[in-house]
Amino acid sequence: MIKEKNIVVYLLLSIFTCGIGALVWFCSLTNDAAMVADEPDFNGVKALLLTIVTCGIYAIYWNYKMGKMIYMAGSKRNVSVSDNSIVYLILAIFGFGIVSYCLMQSDLNKFANS
């Protein structure tokens, strides 16, 4: 399935690489969520390109969609995760997307342990 990832390492990598680590984390989160939700069309590189082309507008939608995907995957696989899609959406709107990355990774790590 997916490997558990250390949130602190990815957070520090994002800071010390001036955001390049956050782009890698974005793709990794997308791919892991697609894997647990059985959504093969949802791809990290495609989501990143859509975010760049739309000047970040797609990223706001992406945060909401990720919350829904993780919640639905948890329901299918009996993994206890909350529907945080609105929380992720609000964080993205106010520029705290990195916080939603941490919360998403925390939820995805639960799939690695199950």
Image: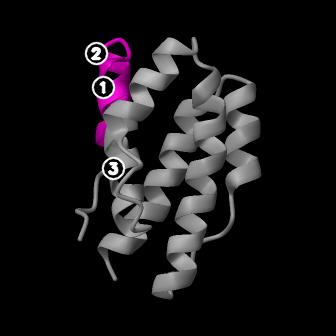
Task: Find residue 17 and name its label.
Answer: 2
Q: Quadrant of residue 45?
A: top left
Name the residue carrying label 3: 31
Give the residues in magenta: 9-24
Name the residue carrying label 1: 21
Q: CA distance from mark 2 to mark 1?
A: 6 Å
Above or below, comparing residue 18 to residue 4 in the picture: above
**Residue type for callout 3:** Asn
Residue 11 visible in the picture: no
Residue 71 visible in the picture: yes
Local secondary structure at mark 1: helix
Left or right of 16? Residue 95 is: right
- Give the crowd class for mark 3: few <14, some 14-19, many >=20 residues within 10 Å: many
Q: Residue at x 41, y 72 (%)?
A: 110
The reply to whether the magenta stretch includes residue 23 is: yes
Callout in the foreground (2, 3)? 3
Local secondary structure at mark 3: helix
- What is the x, y in percent for residue 92? 67, 31
Above or below, comparing residue 66 to residue 74 in the picture: above
Local secondary structure at mark 2: loop
Q: Nearer the viewer, residue 18 or 53?
A: 53
The reply to whether the magenta stretch includes residue 50 is: no
Q: Nearer the viewer, residue 52 or 23?
A: 52
Above or below, comparing residue 1 to residue 43 in the picture: below
